Amino acid sequence: MTTTTALIEPVTLAGLPLTSPFVMAPMTREHSPGGVPTPEVAAYYRRRAENGVGLIITEGVLVDHPSAGHQRDVPRLTEGAAEDGWRHVTAEVHAAGGRIAAQLWHLGSQFEGDGAWTPQTMSGGDFDALLRAYAESARVAVWAGFDAVEVHAAHGYLLDEFLWPVTNPSGRHRDFPAEVVRVIRTEIPACMPLIVRFSQFKERDYSARIASTPDELGVLLEGFRNAGADVLHASQRRFWEPVFEGSDRNLAGWAKHLTGLPSITVGSIGLTRDFARSARMRELLDRRARGEYDLMALGRVLLGNPAWVKLAEAGRHDEINDYRKADEEQYA
């Protein structure tokens, strides 16, 4: 890596102009009392936007349904105070030249309450109620000034539970996640990118798979594309690891190859100071240059390094901090 490497350069994602190909991945922070984002939340996101991150994807935002999640300090996307709080967030990100997507989230059976709660199988009107909840949150996202919407269908949460044979062995309602995408598509402008985040692994099972072959994965992803998805955000633990035998493509590479949609890669990018000058960094950029994926998402490294992109581009590697678990407890 040299200081002449252009990391911050304009790109376009599904018609949305961005100042750089770097994305802030969604990370739960729990700093929104009563589900309402504060001015500190707005400043937190703005710092990343003004330091070279082209697209911010918010922490998971709970849709407006009682079953979505129990944490009081996780933000929601509902009319009223939460909408007003998010409008301030989007204004701050836009003032810094960035773009921001709202990630719509339902925890599903990973909901962890007071110990008395037991997961229940969805049936009947539950599906319609949740479709309405996703639709309402999508409408609020538009009103609050977001540039895009992301559907969280990864990591073992509600929508991913329909895709994973372990939590849905019968395969019933496997198309429900695509139905969520379809209803959101009808609630947002045609020009607003709709992103779907998916994964093979789960938060509690790193060996899990929703697809054992490219053909199986293609069926699932085509469902999202046909429902109106514009971008696929492929979450994996390490971006450089191949997904299927016989190819070195990563998960984002397969998503783009199978559907033709632009994709975002993510997974252990930049966790150490040396990453920005390492062979892995060159590999990250080379894979993008070859067209394997379109954008590159940074996660935990941005907690302790809001300026990671600018520092990496300038070759100021010694000013980059290694990721530490303690970074997750701070909010800066």
Image (cartoon, rainbow, N blue to C red):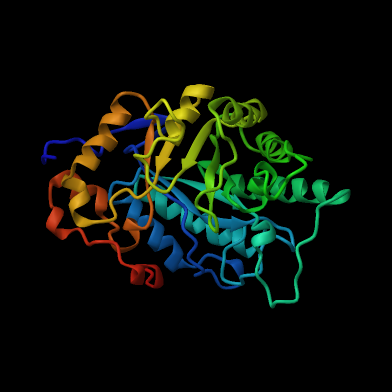
Indicate left or right for 203 with 18 as reference: right
Q: Residue at x 45, y 45 (%)?
A: 236
Indicate left or right for 28 with 322 as reference: right
The front one of 86 and 224 is 224
**Quarter of the image where one finds residue 212:** top right
The front one of 240 and 99 is 240
Q: Residue at x 31, y 32 (%)?
A: 10
Q: Residue at x 44, y 30 (%)?
A: 245
Please state the horizontal and vertical placement of residue 12, each as a whole percent of the image. 39, 29
Indicate left or right for 13 with 76 as reference: left
Is 318 placed above or below 197 here? below
Q: How many marks?
A: 0
Indicate left or right for 193 with 224 as reference: left
The front one of 89 and 127 is 127
Please state the horizontal and vertical placement of residue 120, each as a whole percent of the image. 80, 60
Please state the horizontal and vertical placement of residue 37, each as a whole percent of the image. 53, 65
Q: Is residue 15 visible?
A: no
Screen quadrant of the C terminus: bottom left
